[in-house]
Amino acid sequence: MLLKAPAEPIPIQEISIPHQNIKLFVKREDLIHPQISGNKYWKLFYNINHYLEKSHEPPYIITFGGAFSNHIAAVSAVGNLSGIQTLGIIRGEELKDKWRDNPTLIFAKRNGMNLKFVTREEYRHKEKLTEFLQNEFPNALIVPEGGTNGEAVEGVKMMLNDQTKDFDYLCTAVGTGGTVAGIARFCEENQKVIGFKVVNDTSLGNKILELTSEKNFDLIDSSFGGYGKIKDENIRFINDFKEQYGIPLEPVYTGKMMQKVFELINEGYFPENSRILCFHTGGLQGIEGANLLLEKQNRNLII
């Protein structure tokens, strides 16, 4: 199955805020596909299509991710829908006997993905793992963690169109940097790009510059205590946002980005008459796993 651009434009939803001179919008990339969600669809778009066009037989896709990885879920769905065998290299050997308690990994297994659990030390050396896997499976497509590579950046271009040209600010959550690199590379010259970092990685700016020569982006810390950490204030914001605007957010990426955007608006960060577009990069599959952890901690759940 080749991934295809949607027949209809992805909807852009205005968010009513009490700042009359600032307009806020969300581009609902989460609606692009029920299983291959948001920016993952576009980051895989050229990776998958170019690979399949070369007619590797039998096709085989290998990638990397953590216990609740949106990328692992998306690649497994591509494999299932395309009849392609997939292998997920999962961080954390301790999960080998616990994956049945993890909704993301259950989803991946149901899609036919084979899972190989490695130690965190092995996972840190993904370059060595990749080299080993490419030697073992010479015809396989090996996609990096988070799907971020040159072809992913090209795919992110598809998130921009005539609808996005009239905005002053383009905002996205940042994990591995591929999405913000693509937006920065292909946006209009007059547009400012803001990446909302959900990881504590001081090298991220340089990694993004390796993917795009453009320097039209700023990175703002939006980790709220660290990658994957969920504070009570994050839960309150996500639940209030869904109740008020009808848009679900997940707690690792888009939820933190939107919370930080609201804080910046209230602090006067954006000039008068700014038009701000935030990309909803999907990942809603992660809510179930987050709620399992929150329930064990006797905390409020994400609705």
Image (tube, grey):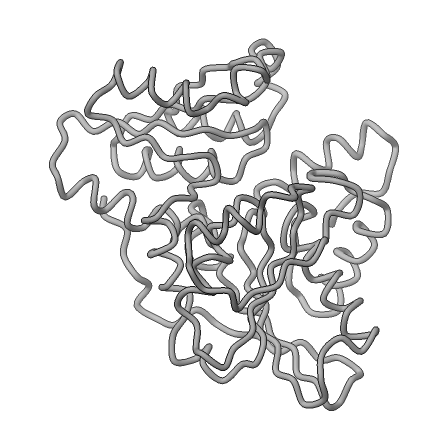
Relative to 46, residue 68 above or below: above
Residue 267, horizontal then vertical, whole percent:
83, 73
Q: With 73 as the anchor, is 240 left or right in this view? A: right
Q: With 248 as the anchor, is 40 left or right in this view? A: left
Residue 51, horizontal then vertical, whole percent:
21, 40
Most foreground residue, 185 or 9: 185
Residue at 51%, 14% (x, y): give it.
Answer: 117
Residue at 56%, 68% (x, y): give it.
Answer: 193
Q: With 125 as the anchor, is 78 left or right in this view? A: left
Q: Is the N terminus in the top left, top right, bottom left or bottom right quadrant? A: top left
Relative to 207, residue 220 above or below: below
Residue 128, horizontal then vertical, whole percent:
41, 19
Residue at 39%, 24% (x, y): give it.
Answer: 113
Give the image quarter of residue 59. Answer: top left
Most foreground residue, 63 or 82: 63
Number of labels in the image equals: 0
Q: With 72 as the anchor, is 87 left or right in this view? A: left
**Going by the picture, which residue comes out furthest to the top?**
97
Give the image quarter of residue 248. Answer: bottom right
Residue 276, horizontal then vertical, whole percent:
61, 77
Give the image quarter of residue 160. Answer: bottom left
Most foreground residue, 171 or 23: 171
Residue at 79%, 35% (x, y): give it.
Answer: 294
